[in-house]
Amino acid sequence: MSAQPQSNRFENIDTLRGVAVLGILMMNIQAFAMVFAAYTNPPAHMDMTGANAAVWFYGHVFFSMKFITIFSGLFGAGILLMLGEEKTPNIKIHYRRMLWLLVIGLIHAWIFWSGDILVPYAVMGMLVVLARRMGPVGLTIMGSVFLLLVGGLMAAAMWSLNILPPEQMEWFAPSAERVAELETVYREGFIARLGENMALTMQAEKGQLTAFAPRLAGVMFIGMALYKWGFLTLQWSAMRYLMTAVISLGIGLPTSWYAASHALETGFAIETFWIGETINYFASLPMALGYAAMIMLVCKLGVFNLILKPFAAVGRMAFTNYLTHTLVMTFIFVGPPGLGLFGTVERIDQFQIVVAVWIAQLIISPLWLSWFRFGPMEWVWRSLTYWKPQPMLKRKSSEPTPPTPA
C-alpha cells in the first residue's frame, strides 16, 4: 500500500519525537558547558572521576547517538507524513520548508551555537525526499549502505588520530593554555565569543556535511521504511513491538556498555579510541530501534496516556524546544547578558540542569498548546513557508492541527 499524505496527527509519533528531543539535550549540554573537544574526548576539560565519570558513562551508554538517531528517523518519516509518495504539488512547499530550515539553522549555528543540526537536516531533507516512492525494503537497504559507509569512514578517521602530528590534534586534545583561553572568551560575554563560535562553526559544518549528514540520510531512509511498514503508525501488534524492543536492546545495550567501559578502562587512549567510538556508532542503531519499539508498545497499550501527553506536546513543539535548549544553555554558560558559567559546571551538575529543563518543557509545552495551535518557532517556520501568517490561536471547534515533521 502506498503512503498517502496525512491531515491528522499521530500522537504516538509526537510522543516519540518529544522523548527524542529531550534525550538529545543530555549529550548536547556538554558542548555548551565545556570546550567542544570534551564532547568527543571527555578528559579534555574538567573532572572525569567519581560521579562525573558515572554521568559520562551512563550518558554514553543510554543517550550517545541514540536519541539523535530516533529524531533523524522521524524526520524522514515526517517527509512521507506530509507528502505521501505520489507526485504532488506540495513538493514545492517541502523545498521551501527545507530552505527556511536551512536559513534558521545557519543563523542558529553562526550566531548562537556551533553544534547546530538544522543545517545538515535541511540539506539532507532536500535529497532524501527524492526516494520517498521507493519500497520499504529498498529504503532499508539504501539506508544501511549509507550507515555502513559512514561507519567505516568514521572508524578510519578515528584510527588516523594515531598518526596525526601533535599540532593537528588541538581540536581533540587542546592544551591547558587553549582551554584557559576559551574559558576566558566565553565568560566575557555573548558578543566576545562570537568569533570563536564562528570559527568552530566553520569546522563543525564541514564535518557535518561530509560525515554526519550522510549518516542522517541513512537513518532518514530507514525512518521512511518504518513508516511504510506501519511501525510508526501503531499497525504492529503489541507482541511484535515487545519482541523488537527485547531483541534490539538485547543487542545494542550490552554492546554500547562495552564501548563505554572500554573507553574508561583505556583512559580514552588515542591508540584505541576508534574502537569504542565505532562500536557505539553501530550499537546506537539497534538501541534507537529498541527505544522506539518500547514507546510504540506503550502507546499501543494505551495504559499511560496521561503520562505520555506532555511528551507528545514536547514533540509537537520539538523545533521550539530544541532552539530553547540553545537559549537556556547559552544564558547559563556564556557571559553577559548570561551567567558565564562556562567551564565551571561539572558533569554531575550538568545532569541536574538537564533534568530541570526536561521538567520545565514537559510542563510548559502542554500549557502552551492548550491555547495555541503551534509552538512559536513552528508558527514562524510554517508562516515563512506559506509566506503568510498562519492562524495561531486555537478555536473551540478548530480543525485538527496539521502534522509538522520537525
Image: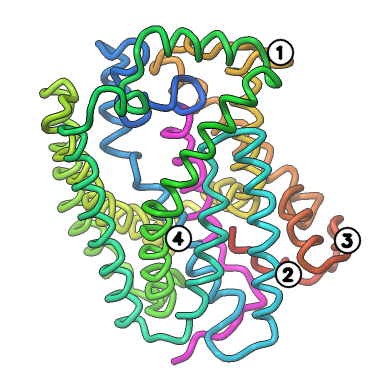
Which mark's residue is nearer the viewer, 1 or 2?
A: 1
Q: Residue at x 70, y 68 (%)?
A: 96
Stretch of the chain drawn in magenta: 1-29
Q: Which residue is mark 1?
A: 336
Which mark's residue is nearer the viewer, 4 or 1?
A: 1
Neighbour class for label 1 at 10 Å: few (<14), some, many (≥20)? Answer: some
Kind of residue at disc 4: Cys
Kind of residue at disc 2: Pro
First-in-chain label (1 vs 2): 1
> Dot 2 lies on which element?
loop
The picture places residue 90, in percent across and down from the top left corner, at: 68, 81
First-in-chain label (2 vs 3): 3
Q: Which residue is mark 2?
A: 400
Neighbour class for label 2 at 10 Å: few (<14), some, many (≥20)? Answer: few
> Dot 4 lies on which element?
helix
Residue 389's label in the rendered image is 3
Residue 65's label in the rendered image is none
Seen in the picture, residue 126 relative to 304 is either above or below; the reply is below
First-in-chain label (4 vs 1): 4
